Amino acid sequence: GIQVEQSPPDLILQEGANSTLRCNFSDSVNNLQWFHQNPWGQLINLFYIPSGTKQNGRLSATTVATERYSLLYISSSQTTDSGVYFCAVATGAVIKAAGNKLTFGGGTRVLVKP
Amino acid sequence: DSGVTQTPKHLITATGQRVTLRCSPRSGDLSVYWYQQSLDQGLQFLIQYYNGEERAKGNILERFSAQQFPDLHSELNLSSLELGDSALYFCASSVREANTGELFFGEGSRLTVL
Protein backbone atom coordinates (compact mmCIF):
# COMPACT_ATOMS: atom_id res chain seq x y z
CA GLY A 1 0.00 0.00 0.00
CA ILE A 2 0.87 3.65 -0.13
CA GLN A 3 3.51 4.95 2.27
CA VAL A 4 3.23 8.32 4.00
CA GLU A 5 6.19 9.87 5.76
CA GLN A 6 6.11 13.03 7.80
CA SER A 7 9.00 15.15 8.97
CA PRO A 8 10.19 16.23 11.38
CA PRO A 9 8.73 13.83 13.96
CA ASP A 10 9.02 16.44 16.71
CA LEU A 11 9.19 20.21 16.66
CA ILE A 12 9.64 22.65 19.52
CA LEU A 13 8.87 26.28 18.73
CA GLN A 14 8.97 29.53 20.57
CA GLU A 15 5.71 31.42 20.38
CA GLY A 16 5.74 33.66 17.32
CA ALA A 17 8.05 31.46 15.27
CA ASN A 18 7.29 30.10 11.82
CA SER A 19 7.63 26.46 10.78
CA THR A 20 7.21 24.07 7.87
CA LEU A 21 5.99 20.49 8.15
CA ARG A 22 6.52 18.06 5.30
CA CYS A 23 4.58 15.04 4.04
CA ASN A 24 5.96 12.68 1.41
CA PHE A 25 3.85 9.96 -0.18
CA SER A 26 4.80 7.07 -2.39
CA ASP A 27 2.05 6.93 -5.04
CA SER A 28 -0.55 8.98 -6.90
CA VAL A 29 -3.37 10.25 -4.70
CA ASN A 30 -6.79 11.77 -5.20
CA ASN A 31 -7.16 12.99 -1.64
CA LEU A 32 -4.73 14.63 0.77
CA GLN A 33 -5.80 16.08 4.08
CA TRP A 34 -3.98 17.77 6.95
CA PHE A 35 -5.31 17.35 10.48
CA HIS A 36 -4.46 18.77 13.87
CA GLN A 37 -4.98 16.44 16.80
CA ASN A 38 -5.39 18.57 19.89
CA PRO A 39 -4.42 17.50 23.42
CA TRP A 40 -7.97 16.20 23.98
CA GLY A 41 -7.59 13.81 21.06
CA GLN A 42 -9.89 15.54 18.60
CA LEU A 43 -8.91 15.40 14.92
CA ILE A 44 -9.52 18.81 13.42
CA ASN A 45 -9.64 19.22 9.64
CA LEU A 46 -7.12 21.81 8.50
CA PHE A 47 -6.96 21.38 4.74
CA TYR A 48 -8.35 19.20 1.99
CA ILE A 49 -5.64 19.72 -0.59
CA PRO A 50 -4.99 17.00 -3.18
CA SER A 51 -3.17 19.65 -5.23
CA GLY A 52 -2.42 23.36 -5.21
CA THR A 53 -2.16 25.89 -2.41
CA LYS A 54 -4.63 26.98 0.24
CA GLN A 55 -4.49 29.41 3.13
CA ASN A 56 -6.54 29.66 6.29
CA GLY A 57 -5.43 32.39 8.67
CA ARG A 58 -1.94 31.67 9.94
CA LEU A 59 -1.89 28.26 8.29
CA SER A 60 -1.27 27.46 4.67
CA ALA A 61 -0.60 24.30 2.71
CA THR A 62 0.82 23.36 -0.65
CA THR A 63 0.62 20.01 -2.40
CA VAL A 64 2.78 19.19 -5.41
CA ALA A 65 1.08 16.01 -6.54
CA THR A 66 3.48 15.33 -9.42
CA GLU A 67 6.40 15.28 -6.97
CA ARG A 68 4.42 13.50 -4.26
CA TYR A 69 4.78 15.85 -1.35
CA SER A 70 2.82 18.37 0.65
CA LEU A 71 3.90 21.14 3.00
CA LEU A 72 2.07 22.71 5.91
CA TYR A 73 3.19 26.18 6.99
CA ILE A 74 2.50 27.57 10.44
CA SER A 75 3.23 31.25 10.82
CA SER A 76 3.39 33.29 14.03
CA SER A 77 2.83 30.14 16.08
CA GLN A 78 0.73 30.24 19.24
CA THR A 79 0.56 27.87 22.19
CA THR A 80 -2.81 26.68 20.94
CA ASP A 81 -1.03 25.30 17.86
CA SER A 82 0.52 22.59 20.04
CA GLY A 83 -0.52 19.05 19.27
CA VAL A 84 0.11 16.48 16.57
CA TYR A 85 -0.24 17.30 12.89
CA PHE A 86 -1.17 14.47 10.58
CA CYS A 87 -1.03 14.20 6.83
CA ALA A 88 -3.31 11.57 5.31
CA VAL A 89 -3.79 10.45 1.72
CA ALA A 90 -6.20 8.31 -0.28
CA THR A 91 -5.84 6.63 -3.65
CA GLY A 92 -9.50 5.77 -4.18
CA ALA A 93 -10.00 7.28 -7.61
CA VAL A 94 -6.74 5.72 -8.75
CA ILE A 95 -7.21 2.28 -7.20
CA LYS A 96 -10.95 1.79 -6.80
CA ALA A 97 -10.64 -1.26 -4.60
CA ALA A 98 -9.01 0.99 -2.03
CA GLY A 99 -12.32 2.72 -1.39
CA ASN A 100 -11.68 6.20 -0.03
CA LYS A 101 -9.69 5.17 3.00
CA LEU A 102 -7.12 7.61 4.29
CA THR A 103 -3.64 6.35 5.07
CA PHE A 104 -2.06 8.43 7.81
CA GLY A 105 1.51 9.43 8.28
CA GLY A 106 3.16 9.08 11.65
CA GLY A 107 2.53 12.72 12.52
CA THR A 108 4.62 15.68 13.62
CA ARG A 109 4.36 16.49 17.32
CA VAL A 110 4.52 20.25 17.81
CA LEU A 111 5.09 22.01 21.10
CA VAL A 112 4.85 25.79 21.14
CA LYS A 113 6.40 27.36 24.21
CA PRO A 114 5.23 30.74 25.55
CA ASP B 1 -18.02 20.51 15.43
CA SER B 2 -17.52 18.15 12.47
CA GLY B 3 -21.13 16.95 12.47
CA VAL B 4 -20.07 13.33 13.04
CA THR B 5 -21.40 11.98 16.33
CA GLN B 6 -19.85 9.10 18.23
CA THR B 7 -21.05 7.40 21.38
CA PRO B 8 -19.96 6.60 23.96
CA LYS B 9 -17.08 9.04 24.43
CA HIS B 10 -15.45 6.89 27.08
CA LEU B 11 -15.82 3.22 27.88
CA ILE B 12 -14.08 1.07 30.48
CA THR B 13 -14.57 -2.67 30.38
CA ALA B 14 -12.85 -5.94 31.22
CA THR B 15 -11.00 -8.47 29.12
CA GLY B 16 -13.27 -10.96 27.39
CA GLN B 17 -16.20 -8.56 27.20
CA ARG B 18 -17.99 -7.19 24.14
CA VAL B 19 -18.76 -3.55 23.36
CA THR B 20 -20.55 -1.63 20.63
CA LEU B 21 -19.47 1.76 19.40
CA ARG B 22 -21.94 3.89 17.50
CA CYS B 23 -21.46 6.52 14.82
CA SER B 24 -23.87 8.92 13.15
CA PRO B 25 -22.40 10.48 10.00
CA ARG B 26 -22.87 14.06 8.87
CA SER B 27 -26.23 14.74 7.28
CA GLY B 28 -26.13 13.62 3.66
CA ASP B 29 -22.88 11.64 3.93
CA LEU B 30 -23.11 8.11 2.58
CA SER B 31 -19.64 6.79 3.49
CA VAL B 32 -18.62 5.82 7.01
CA TYR B 33 -15.12 4.84 8.05
CA TRP B 34 -13.72 3.37 11.25
CA TYR B 35 -10.19 3.99 12.49
CA GLN B 36 -8.24 2.80 15.51
CA GLN B 37 -5.58 4.93 17.16
CA SER B 38 -3.32 3.18 19.60
CA LEU B 39 -0.05 4.42 21.05
CA ASP B 40 2.14 1.93 19.21
CA GLN B 41 0.24 1.62 15.88
CA GLY B 42 -0.79 5.17 15.09
CA LEU B 43 -4.01 5.76 13.15
CA GLN B 44 -5.07 2.56 11.41
CA PHE B 45 -7.94 2.17 8.97
CA LEU B 46 -10.35 -0.60 9.93
CA ILE B 47 -13.26 -0.59 7.50
CA GLN B 48 -15.37 1.59 5.16
CA TYR B 49 -19.08 1.35 4.35
CA TYR B 50 -20.79 3.16 1.53
CA ASN B 51 -24.58 3.36 1.53
CA GLY B 52 -24.90 0.18 3.59
CA GLU B 53 -22.33 -1.92 1.78
CA GLU B 54 -18.78 -2.74 2.79
CA ARG B 55 -16.46 -0.79 0.49
CA ALA B 56 -12.93 -1.35 1.76
CA LYS B 57 -11.33 -3.32 4.54
CA GLY B 58 -8.16 -2.66 6.44
CA ASN B 59 -6.47 -4.31 9.37
CA ILE B 60 -9.65 -5.23 11.17
CA LEU B 61 -9.42 -8.21 13.51
CA GLU B 62 -11.84 -11.12 13.15
CA ARG B 63 -13.08 -10.31 16.68
CA PHE B 64 -14.28 -6.97 15.34
CA SER B 65 -17.25 -6.44 13.05
CA ALA B 66 -19.14 -3.46 11.72
CA GLN B 67 -22.27 -2.61 9.83
CA GLN B 68 -24.04 0.39 8.38
CA PHE B 69 -27.78 0.58 8.80
CA PRO B 70 -30.44 1.91 6.37
CA ASP B 71 -30.48 5.25 8.23
CA LEU B 72 -26.70 5.37 7.51
CA HIS B 73 -25.54 5.20 11.12
CA SER B 74 -22.86 2.62 11.78
CA GLU B 75 -21.84 0.38 14.64
CA LEU B 76 -18.48 -1.19 15.40
CA ASN B 77 -18.67 -4.31 17.52
CA LEU B 78 -15.60 -5.41 19.45
CA SER B 79 -15.73 -8.84 21.11
CA SER B 80 -13.49 -11.02 23.28
CA LEU B 81 -11.68 -7.85 24.25
CA GLU B 82 -7.99 -7.93 25.05
CA LEU B 83 -5.78 -5.40 26.82
CA GLY B 84 -4.28 -4.46 23.46
CA ASP B 85 -7.65 -3.31 22.16
CA SER B 86 -7.45 -0.28 24.40
CA ALA B 87 -7.39 2.63 21.97
CA LEU B 88 -9.19 5.64 20.62
CA TYR B 89 -11.71 4.58 17.97
CA PHE B 90 -12.69 7.18 15.40
CA CYS B 91 -15.53 7.26 12.97
CA ALA B 92 -15.40 9.48 9.90
CA SER B 93 -17.81 10.25 7.10
CA SER B 94 -17.62 11.72 3.62
CA VAL B 95 -20.10 12.85 1.00
CA ARG B 96 -21.73 11.07 -1.90
CA GLU B 97 -18.99 9.18 -3.72
CA ALA B 98 -17.39 5.95 -2.60
CA ASN B 99 -13.90 6.83 -3.74
CA THR B 100 -13.49 10.58 -3.31
CA GLY B 101 -14.18 13.42 -0.95
CA GLU B 102 -13.00 15.02 2.25
CA LEU B 103 -13.34 12.97 5.44
CA PHE B 104 -14.67 14.49 8.65
CA PHE B 105 -13.94 12.78 11.96
CA GLY B 106 -15.98 12.41 15.10
CA GLU B 107 -14.50 13.07 18.53
CA GLY B 108 -13.73 9.40 19.05
CA SER B 109 -14.62 6.74 21.57
CA ARG B 110 -11.88 6.04 24.09
CA LEU B 111 -11.91 2.37 25.05
CA THR B 112 -10.00 1.11 28.07
CA VAL B 113 -9.81 -2.64 28.63
CA LEU B 114 -8.74 -3.66 32.13
Image (spheres, rainbow, N blue to C red):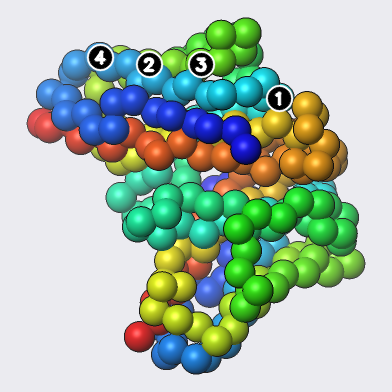
Q: Is residue A95 above or below residue B47?
A: above
- Work out how far the residue at label 2 is from the one at label 3, CA to CA, in angstroms: 13 Å
Q: Is residue B51 above or below residue A22?
A: below
Same chain for marks 4 and 1?
yes
The answer to whether residue A56 is seen in the rendering is no
Amino acid type shown at disc 1: Asn
Amino acid type shown at disc 4: Asn
- Chain of the residue where label 3 is placed in the rendered structure: A
Residue at the (44%, 89%) spot, across then down: B15
The answer to the question of whether label 2 and label 3 lie on touching residues, with beta carbons closer than 8 A, is: no
- Work out how far the residue at label 4 is from the one at label 3, CA to CA, in angstroms: 20 Å
Q: Which residue is mark 4?
A: A18
Look at discs 1 and 2 and give the one toward the viewer: 1
Counting residues from the N terminus, which is met first, the one under dot 4 or under dot 1?
Answer: 4
Residue A13, how many percent across, how many down? 17, 25
Amino acid type shown at disc 2: Tyr
Counting residues from the N terminus, which is met first, the one under dot 3 or under dot 1?
Answer: 1
How many neighbours does mark 2 have within 10 angstroms: few (below 14), some (14-19), or many (20 or more)? some
Counting residues from the N terminus, which is met first, the one under dot 4 or under dot 3?
Answer: 4
